[in-house]
Image (cartoon, helix red, strand yellow):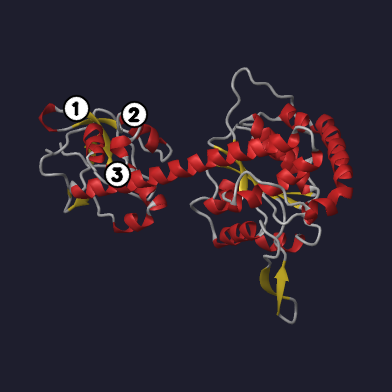
Amino acid sequence: MRAAIGKYVVLPSEEALTAVTLWVAATHIQTALQHAPRLAVMSPTKGCGKSRVLDVLHETVHQPMMTVNTSPAVIFRVIGKNPPTLLVDEADTIFGPKASGASEVLRGLLNAGHQRNRPAWRISGPEHKPTPFPTFAMAAIAGIGNLPDTITDRAVVLRMQKRKPGEKVAPFRSRYATPELNALRDRLAAWLGPLRSTAARMVPAMPVEDRAADTWEPLVIIADLAGGHWPNSARAACLAMTRYEAVQDEQTSLKTRLLRDIHRIYERENNPEALPTQDLVAALIQDADGPWAEYGTKGLNAYHLGNLLRDFGIGPANYRFGKGRQAKAYARNRFVDAWARHCPDLAEAAPDPVQGGAPARPAHMPAPATPMGSLPVGPPGGATGPKHTR
């Protein structure tokens, strides 16, 4: 199974390939497990192979249910004593900024279904009786960009990337690939079927704790049942992938801190249209309570700042200030969308940079002239960019 998955998909690492293989196997004994780990398949852009992962999973997991836009009510009713394996594609359209109330219901269902005995109660039937609907089911969720933290916290996370020029995969053609993968699926299910009761009693030694242990335990159980190199490989994959996600969480927290600190600097400077990159870096480094003076080997610099802000779609542009000064600068209106998404408490109170028909600016900064390059504009419906004096 591991060889077949690696034949059709380039995964981020050998550990990730091991994890996916064990996850597939775990779907065939999910009724014996206490937790149903999610498989979060995320990519920064299209063309990174996330949909191909779901294609392979569809032919190898237990009773697959592929869905793109299925309502929570349907999923409530298909999960039973022998639940399907949910394969949710295009999750970025479900959990994106325009998510509906139904999306929040689906997120709650996916979160609850990570653990046994977390039913969703609904009024049902002609007599309108309170009825518990089971939620426990394995699920793979694929999308562009990040998934909600509450889902990734319960998931084995695959961060897909585009293939390098030298990386090759076999073409996935249903008439050739499906029989091969289905045969492996059936052999895997036949091996695991008699081991359900054994798996249900197992309490494996785990290299991690708390929710990470809950998520990875089913995969380690499969590995211990398999024997050979699998127990060591599974635990090594668990450690490597959970540590990587811990670093990602730390970076996310750091980037949110950066947005808040930049908001504070703009407020202190009376919300100018733009701040030169070097001035912004200097203000961050001078914050005695911030981490920026010790960031990297010699403190935060313009390159670091650009890297940290890139994921928010924020970058500098050439800008001309008074007295002929020209510099790279960050326009305030580029931050508005990121503040609204990641620091909503700040965005709600954020003052308009244009007051009384004239751009607000720090006292020491003369009115900016026409920019040398085009400044990027804000999001639709948001600020439309600085109005330059002529």
> Mark 3 sits on what residue?
290
Measure the alpha-carbon separation of dots 3 and 1. Answer: 28 Å
Whether the residues at callouts 2 and 3 have beta carbons within 8 Å, the answer is no
In the image, 23: left or right of 178?
left
Place of residue 152 in the rendered image (x, y in percent of width and height, measured from the top left): 57, 48
Look at label 3 and name its amino acid. Answer: Gly
Choose between 354 and 310: the one closer to the eye: 310
Residue found at x 55% / y 62%: 101
Look at label 1 and name its amino acid. Answer: Gln
Residue found at x 25% / y 53%: 352
Numbered disc in front, either 3 or 1 = 3
Query: Residue lying farthest front?
Result: 205
Look at label 2 and name its amino acid. Answer: Thr
**How many C-alpha atoms fall within 10 Å of the one at disc 1: few (<14), some, or many (≥20)?**
some
> Mark 2 sits on what residue?
297
Choose between 332 and 17: the one closer to the eye: 17
Place of residue 389 in the rendered image (x, y in percent of width and height, measured from the top left): 16, 39
